[in-house]
């Protein structure tokens, strides 16, 4: 049967091509998924072991599972001095040691500054997790090797000097100054003749001036958040960490360079080093650390990502299976006379069954193998384009057995499964059918079991959707609800309900989709003879119409669901965030310059701005609770109205008044303040002293201005400076035009860029949160829609396949129409109309279903944050329908050419 099967495949090669393309696309996606996973695993492994530099071994705490709470506390509170680093360096077989100690440091050059992660110098540059590309690592105190990105921002090179400082060093200086002042006061009290101590610890100096001796890069991504790491001497690093000496610095890991890495010699060296370690510490080789990182990622990010992507590959293959099933149905129907003749000369039913499955297996093998090659080629192209490198992934193609075995096996199995129904049909052919005329239209009705099952699934699905929405509604209105303590299960019930509804509609598509096609076709048939022919043709095989329509329905429904959910999420969250804030955007910092303020205020999209001095204070509410307050000095209420979205009508602000919010920014509770004798605010000064100030409270319903404080209060600006309050910072409040053509993320980025020279300034507010939400939603939507587009593409291939098969089936009919006067153009138009009906009816149903699912999902998720917006995503849905229509027209070209190419007389003779 093998030779016969191959001859039959050659004869039907053109019919098998669309099914092969569907398999090829799906398997290429699956192969690309495994290649992407391999690249991600290799990149994460490289980044995980990047801290080794060229070290061979790492000293680290034992795994969590091997330590109890007491042991964990001991292991994770060790300092450098506990490891006997000098003795470790002197141990036989150890060529070098690097202590993995670090501190966040601010590096300043003139009016430019940048935050960097600083690490300790090692016994050799090769042990560093970063690469020194110019100069060298520090060999003495007051030297630094800067990351290339930091050097560029600061405008420095090897040989220049910069100033380094840190919050920890600043805190230590303050403590040292207070301690010195206390000792001086005590000494003066005890003996006025005793000199005041003037010695100040090294770390108490106002920052340190250091020489740039090297430039570093971070090729392995050991410090991706900082663009690399700076390198400092032990003493300088300790000062920046706010400790007295390097031995007091906290540390978890030590890296070793072993002289002889042969098994026996390395074991002997490790045994000698282990005697110097604190309790609960162990030594791990670089290879073992890499294996451990892969295992940890397999339980986390990598496997989750691979599974997530593979789910879309499986979806694509399921859609491809519908295309394959259609193809084999027609193939078996066309070969019915041949199969009957084979039965006549002695072929058994099992042989015919095996022949169809063998043909499917061969098609699956060839198409899947080509799909794997296509997947490899696509990933190689993506790597060559630089996109992989920009994402921090390995750009080379990393092959594994899964890349070849899984897609090919899955492609073969899915193709064989899709052909099972056709194989059974082949065994039903009797020898007598060799004498009957070929009738290719399928007339068997869908079974009662399908109808009953789909009805039960639809009822269960609607019940699940209703139950989920009902429980969320009860929760939102404050009634008892299962969602209060079991939100996850309630959400899963609603998702399962949507899935059951969708599966019910897919399963019963044989009943309702042809009816819809017939209804739309009846309207379209009024437009002319071509449309009438298309309307008649599309009714001839309802089972195939349903299978083709479902393939497209799946993809369009998922795209519409995601697009609707994304649009609803953005609108709902934007409204929810706006109601929680009264100022669109604020910038706060202690050293904000006038030039920076002017630059930020003129950013496109910023419509108004107000600069004000600030001071932190504490106050007791009327019920005696402590509240942290940020006092902001403004000239008058009119200037505040320009930047604040709140009703301030009738509110005045005198020199002895303070304007307070009606609700707490931290917990939303209503605020009340003592008014009879005024409210006293306690303001902390930079020198540690406190200043009380009593003001008359006035309240208005404006919402969170800054989320860092329980409330933001406004007072007369004259209170600052000569008025007795020392400003500890400045605030720039900005109003943003949300209707402006400039995207919010661009406005936010431009304002942040205005303060880029000062890392101590933060930009927050609803614009920042909205930009974050919109960016996250847009990225997720783009990714998901891009993945689902593969299924849509395969479904459109199915439309082309269905038309091609229909043309082959209707050879005699097309010839008859041509013979009685139908022109070539009319015949082509009839196929175009038929293709459009298939695509647009399925697409419109998919859009309606997807919109409903998207609305339900949005209500389930976003109603917890505010009033849910239920938009119709015209742009995405319209784009999907337009693409489906265009692809349908393109898909009709080749079948139409085939239909009109053969002269009517020859077609009648062939038929």
Image (cartoon, rainbow, N blue to C red):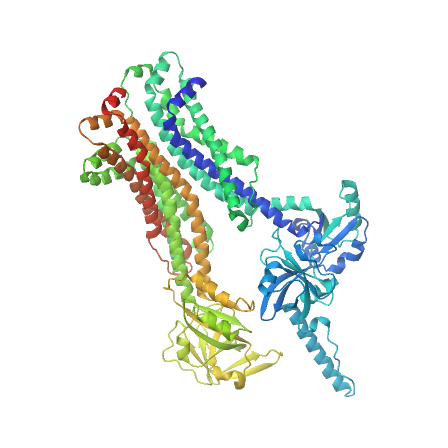
Residue 352 visible, this angle: yes
Above or below, 726 against 550 in this view is below
Point out residue 782 in the picture as x, y percentages from the top left corner. 43, 50
Viewer-nearest residue: 602 or 531: 602
Point out residue 487 in the picture as x, y percentages from the top left corner. 45, 53
Quadrant hosting residue 71: bottom right
Above or below, 19 against 123 in this view is above
Report the residue at 21% width, 26% height from top: 816
Point out residue 811 in the picture as x, y percentages from the top left corner. 27, 26
Circle count = 0
Q: Quadrant of the C terminus?
A: top left
Viewer-nearest residue: 523 or 259: 259
Above or below, 321 against 130 in this view is above
Q: Residue furthest bottom?
A: 192
Viewer-nearest residue: 399 or 546: 399
Point out residue 111 in the picture as x, y percentages from the top left corner. 58, 71
Residue 705 visible, this angle: no
User: Does residue 576 appear to the left or right of 439 in the view shown?
Assistant: right
Q: Quadrant of the N terminus?
A: top left
Report the residue at 51% width, 78% height from top: 613
Report the residue at 78% width, 88% height from top: 193
């Amino acid at each position: 049967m093998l030779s016969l099967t191959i001859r039959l495949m050659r004869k039907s090669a053109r019919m098998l091509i669309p099914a092969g393309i569907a398999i090829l696309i799906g398997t290429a996606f699956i192969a690309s998924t495994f290649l992407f996973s391999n690249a991600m695993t290799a990149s994460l492994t490289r980044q995980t072991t990047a801290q080794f530099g060229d070290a061979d071994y790492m000293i680290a705490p034992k795994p969590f599972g091997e330590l109890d709470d007491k042991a964990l506390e001991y292991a994770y509170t060790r300092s450098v001095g506990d490891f006997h680093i000098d003795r470790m360096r002197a141990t036989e077989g150890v060529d070098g040691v690097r202590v993995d100690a670090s501190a966040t440091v601010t590096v300043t050059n003139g009016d430019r500054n940048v935050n960097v992660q600083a690490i300790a110098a090692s016994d050799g540059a090769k042990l560093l997790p970063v690469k020194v590309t110019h100069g060298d690592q520090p060999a003495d105190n007051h030297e630094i090797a800067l990351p290339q990105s930091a050097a560029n921002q600061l405008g420095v090179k090897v040989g220049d000097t910069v100033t380094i400082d840190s919050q920890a060093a600043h805190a230590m200086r303050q403590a040292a100054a207070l301690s010195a002042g206390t000792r001086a006061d005590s000494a003066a009290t005890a003996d006025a003749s005793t000199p005041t101590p003037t010695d100040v610890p090294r770390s108490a100096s106002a920052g340190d001036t250091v020489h740039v001796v090297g430039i570093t890069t971070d090729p392995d991504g050991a410090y991706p958040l900082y663009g690399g790491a700076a390198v400092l001497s032990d003493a300088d690093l300790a000062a920046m960490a706010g400790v007295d000496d390097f031995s007091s610095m906290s540390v978890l890991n030590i890296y070793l360079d072993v002289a002889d890495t042969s098994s026996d010699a390395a074991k002997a060296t490790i045994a000698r080093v282990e005697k110097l370690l604190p309790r609960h510490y162990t030594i791990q080789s670089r290879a073992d650390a890499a294996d451990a990182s892969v295992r940890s990622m397999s339980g986390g990010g990598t496997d989750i990502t691979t599974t997530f992507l593979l789910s879309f590959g499986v979806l694509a293959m399921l859609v491809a299976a519908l295309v394959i099933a259609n193809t084999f149905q027609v193939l078996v129907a066309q070969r019915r006379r041949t199969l009957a003749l084979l039965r006549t000369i002695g072929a058994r039913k099992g042989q015919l069954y095996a022949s169809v499955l063998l043909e499917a297996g061969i098609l699956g093998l060839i198409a899947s193998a080509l799909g794997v090659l296509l997947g490899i080629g696509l990933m190689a192209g993506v790597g060559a384009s630089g996109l992989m490198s920009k994402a921090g992934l390995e750009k080379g193609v990393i092959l594994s057995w899964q890349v070849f075995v899984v897609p090919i096996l899955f492609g073969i199995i899915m193709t064989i499964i899709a052909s099972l129904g056709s194989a059974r049909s082949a065994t039903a052919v009797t020898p007598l059918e060799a004498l009957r005329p070929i009738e290719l239209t399928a007339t068997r009705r869908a079974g009662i079991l399908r109808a009953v099952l789909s009805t039960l699934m639809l009822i269960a699905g609607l019940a699940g959707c209703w139950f989920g929405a009902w429980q969320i509604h009860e929760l939102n209105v404050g009634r008892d609800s299962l969602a209060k303590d079991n939100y996850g299960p309630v959400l899963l019930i609603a998702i399962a309900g949507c899935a059951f509804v969708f599966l019910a509609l897919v399963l019963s598509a044989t009943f309702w989709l042809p009816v819809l096609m017939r209804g739309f076709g009846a309207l379209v048939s009024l437009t002319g003879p071509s449309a009438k022919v298309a309307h008649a043709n599309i009714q001839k095989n309802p089972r195939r119409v349903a299978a083709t329509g479902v393939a497209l329905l799946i993809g369009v429904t998922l795209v519409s669901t995601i697009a609707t959910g994304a649009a609803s999420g953005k609108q709902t969250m934007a409204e929810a965030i706006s109601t929680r804030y009264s100022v669109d955007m604020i910038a706060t910092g202690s050293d904000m310059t006038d030039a920076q303020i002017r630059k930020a205020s003129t950013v496109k999209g910023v419509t108004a701005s107000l600069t004000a001095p600030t001071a932190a204070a504490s106050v007791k509410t009327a019920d005696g609770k402590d509240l942290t307050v940020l006092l902001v000095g403004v000239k008058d209420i009119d200037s505040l109205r320009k930047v604040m979205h709140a009703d301030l009508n009738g509110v005045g602000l005198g020199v002895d008044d303070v304007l307070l919010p009606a609700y707490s920014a931290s917990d939303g509770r209503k605020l009340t303040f003592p008014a009879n004798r005024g409210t006293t605010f306690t303001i902390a000064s930079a020198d540690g002293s406190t200043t009380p100030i009593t003001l008359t409270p006035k309240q208005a319903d404006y919402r969170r201005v800054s989320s860092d404080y329980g409330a933001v209060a406004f007072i007369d600006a004259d209170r600052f400076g000569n008025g007795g309050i020392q400003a500890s910072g400045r605030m720039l409040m900005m109003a943003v035009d949300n209707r402006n053509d400039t995207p919010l993320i661009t406005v936010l980025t431009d304002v942040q860029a205005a303060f880029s020279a000062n890392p101590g300034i933060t930009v927050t507010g609803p614009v920042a949160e909205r930009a974050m939400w919109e960016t996250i939603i847009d990225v997720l939507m783009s990714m998901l829609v891009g993945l689902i587009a593969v299924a849509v593409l395969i479904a459109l291939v199915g439309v082309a396949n269905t038309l091609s098969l229909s043309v082959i089936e209707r050879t005699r009919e097309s010839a008859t129409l041509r013979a009685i006067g139908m022109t070539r153009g009319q015949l082509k138009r009839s196929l175009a109309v038929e293709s459009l009906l298939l695509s647009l009816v399925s697409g419109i149903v998919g859009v309606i279903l997807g919109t409903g699912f998207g609305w339900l999902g949005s209500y389930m998720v976003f109603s917890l944050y505010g009033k849910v917006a239920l938009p119709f995503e015209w742009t995405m849905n319209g784009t999907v329908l337009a693409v489906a229509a265009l692809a349908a027209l393109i898909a009709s070209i080749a079948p139409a050419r085939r239909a009109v190419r053969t002269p009517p007389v020859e077609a009648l003779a062939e038929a």
